[in-house]
Image: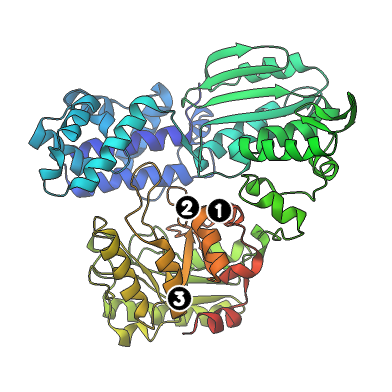
């Protein structure tokens, strides 16, 4: 079976984690992590290139050694270097890294100090309150670990939206090769753009269902055929993701798509509305007295229930039906409304492209502007900028702007918010920028009150305009830090600050609930990719999906405005 770019990236990330547990050279660890990111972002299948007899293209940060490992992974499906590291690891230590909030350094400390070698060892240590005594831990982190262990041992596995998207797009492309195929669409939580997906539901219409089922189970990533029937089949892919395929008749397509898209609560609420109108609504159609009266399209389903069309991202039974009845549904933001990106990095810090390459990448996507927001000096691992280096970059931006005509690069910085709430660079430097993005990158373990006050003090600084990834979470890897988000949103409103929806697939921060809170309180948000290479500008679709789940319209978003109007809005 062909190896996908995501498989190669996962092997490199796992190698980096195990090397870090061993205490290997940080530069070696970083090389594997950088290679993983480069591979996962590459637009073409490296496996397909090699299997066609072509050479690997020159990839940033991937030299002869790592290129050789890519070739080995494509040829064998495994990496001998990783296998050797796994053999050297005691017990089930590598499995600990799959827990949210537990990185390689902490896993190594748990093994070294407490002899932890497995999830059951870790659970026992947490239950005995032995973890909280270790440096770098505490009662709260111990409780979070215990919750993560129990989810891991007893709960379903969920997949990030980006991983699910890659699977869905590839599988849909494969199914479209079925003779007589009509519609092919991924429904469920994936279509609602949830941040994680438990499984995939794919609906198809076609002339002969058996042809679609045959092609479905022959997909090259299928590991196990769980069930196979005439109208529904279930498989488990190599990644572990379960996929259900349902063949529906065209006359039922809209009803089935609605049924398999909405949350359970949304579907129940809509069925109850239908009952009040003397209708029966299910996945087969809309019926009155046993006679089909609709179901070909979702629009028809909603109309028969007495509602306008409700966008998939809103179908959670969080007030969307009531808003629809009152004509109060927002006109949700769309990808084409975004005029620029307000958070990006270059090689000056931890990015992987030059200033000019990033600008060109943004222009190719039809943007009118781009903010360059390098890390500030306290983030030494990212080679953060001090005042002198930042001013040199400002001069470089000025020179490039003279050449770019109608495209503008904004001078900015992702300044660190220090533990006391002060900013990592002096006001006289920040005052020379077009605007400032601020972020927390350290001391995630402060109390709820201390963390909230830290951020509010940072927003007291009149040069801080946008708070980046406001809760610090990494989905499935790091829990949000403790914070009173309502106080932070209110504080932003009072001070003229704004919040970011970070599009990085492992962040999606703010979450949908807090997006809606910000909207209702009147705080506008920036949709930004935090791009470290031009390819990452395409992550904007994830921020747009998150914004739509948060009920955001075009006017709720900062970077739907022209450069001039944006700067007026940001001015404090």
Q: Which residue is tagged 3?
A: 497
Q: Left of 87 or right of it: where is 70? A: right
Cα distance between the residues tagged 1 and 3: 20 Å
Q: Is residue 142 visible?
A: yes
**Dots 1 and 2: beta carbons under 8 Å?**
yes
Compared to residue 336, the image places residue 271 above or below, namely above
Compared to residue 282, the image places residue 9 above or below, namely below
Please identify the residue farthest to the left as the structure is shown.
113
Residue 419, located in which quarter of the rendered image? Answer: bottom left
Q: Left of 5 or right of it: where is 551? A: right
Q: Residue at x 27, y 48 (%)?
A: 30
Q: Which residue is tagged 1?
A: 546
Q: Upstream in the sequence, badge 1 or badge 3?
A: 3
Q: Nearer the viewer, residue 321 or 235?
A: 321
Horizontal and vertical percent position of residue 120: 22, 25
Q: Is residue 22 visible?
A: no
Q: Which residue is tagged 2?
A: 508
Q: Upstream in the sequence, badge 3 or badge 2?
A: 3
Secondary element type, mark 1: helix
Horizontal and vertical percent position of residue 240: 46, 25
Label 3 CA crowd tier, 10 Å (few <14, some 14–19, many 20+): many
Q: Nearer the viewer, residue 149 or 253?
A: 149
Compared to residue 11, the image places residue 435 above or below, namely below
Q: Nearer the viewer, residue 172 or 62?
A: 172
Residue 10, located in which quarter of the rendered image? Answer: top left
Q: Nearer the viewer, residue 502 or 316?
A: 316
């Amino acid at each position: 079976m062909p190896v996908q770019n995501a498989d190669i990236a996962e092997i490199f990330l796992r190698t980096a984690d195990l090397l870090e547990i061993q205490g290997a050279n940080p530069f070696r660890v970083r090389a594997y992590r950088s290679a993983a990111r480069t591979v996962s972002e590459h637009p073409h299948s490296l496996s397909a290139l090699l299997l066609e007899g072509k050479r690997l293209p020159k990839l940033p940060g991937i030299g002869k050694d790592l290129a050789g490992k890519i070739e080995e992974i494509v040829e064998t499906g495994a990496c001998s270097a990783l296998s050797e590291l796994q053999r050297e690891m005691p017990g089930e230590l590598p499995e600990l890294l799959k827990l949210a909030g537990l990185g390689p350094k902490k896993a190594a400390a748990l093994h070294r100090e407490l002899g932890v070698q497995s999830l059951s060892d870790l659970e026992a240590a947490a239950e005995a309150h032995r973890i909280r005594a270790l440096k770098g831990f505490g009662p709260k982190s111990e409780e979070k670990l215990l919750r993560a262990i129990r989810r891991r041992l007893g709960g379903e596995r969920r997949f990030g939206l980006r991983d699910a998207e890659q699977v869905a797009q590839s599988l849909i492309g494969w199914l479209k090769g079925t003779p007589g195929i009509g519609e092919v669409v991924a429904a469920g939580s994936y279509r609602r753009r949830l941040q994680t997906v438990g499984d995939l539901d794919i609906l198809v219409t076609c002339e002969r269902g058996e042809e679609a089922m045959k092609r479905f189970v022959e997909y090259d990533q299928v590991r196990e055929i769980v069930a196979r029937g005439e109208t529904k089949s279930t498989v488990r892919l190599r990644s572990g993701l379960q996929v259900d395929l349902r063949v529906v008749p065209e006359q039922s397509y809209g009803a089935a798509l609605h049924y398999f898209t909405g949350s359970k609560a949304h579907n129940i609420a809509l069925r109850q509305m239908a009952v009040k109108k003397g209708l029966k609504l299910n996945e087969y159609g809309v019926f009155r007295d046993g006679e089909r009266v609709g179901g070909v399209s979702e629009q028809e389903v909603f109309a028969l229930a007495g509602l306008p069309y409700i966008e998939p991202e809103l179908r959670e039974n969080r007030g969307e039906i009531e808003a629809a009845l009152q004509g109060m549904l927002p006109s949700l933001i769309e990808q084409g409304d975004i005029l620029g990106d307000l958070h990006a990095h270059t090689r000056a810090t931890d990015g992987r492209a030059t200033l000019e390459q990033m600008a060109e990448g943004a222009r190719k996507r039809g943007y009118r502007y781009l903010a360059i927001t390098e890390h500030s000096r306290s983030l030494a691992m990212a080679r953060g900028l001090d005042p002198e280096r930042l001013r040199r970059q400002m001069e470089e931006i000025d020179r490039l702007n003279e050449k770019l005509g109608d495209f503008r690069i904004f001078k900015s910085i992702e300044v660190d918010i220090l533990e006391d709430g002060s900013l990592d660079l002096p006001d006289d430097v920040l005052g020379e920028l077009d605007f400032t993005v601020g972020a927390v990158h350290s001391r995630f373990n402060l109390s709820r009150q201390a963390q909230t006050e830290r951020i509010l003090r940072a927003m007291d600084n009149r040069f801080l305009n946008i708070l980046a990834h406001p809760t610090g979470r990494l989905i499935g890897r790091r829990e949000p830090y403790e914070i009173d988000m309502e106080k932070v949103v209110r504080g932003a409103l009072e001070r003229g600050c704004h919040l970011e929806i970070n599009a990085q697939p492992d962040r999606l921060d703010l979450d949908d609930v807090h997006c809606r809170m910000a909207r209702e309180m009147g705080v506008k948000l920036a949709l930004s990719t935090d791009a470290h290479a031009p390819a990452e500008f395409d992550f904007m679709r994830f921020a747009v999906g998150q914004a739509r789940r948060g009920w955001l319209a075009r006017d709720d978003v900062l970077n739907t405005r022209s450069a001039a109007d944006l700067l007026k809005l940001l001015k404090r």
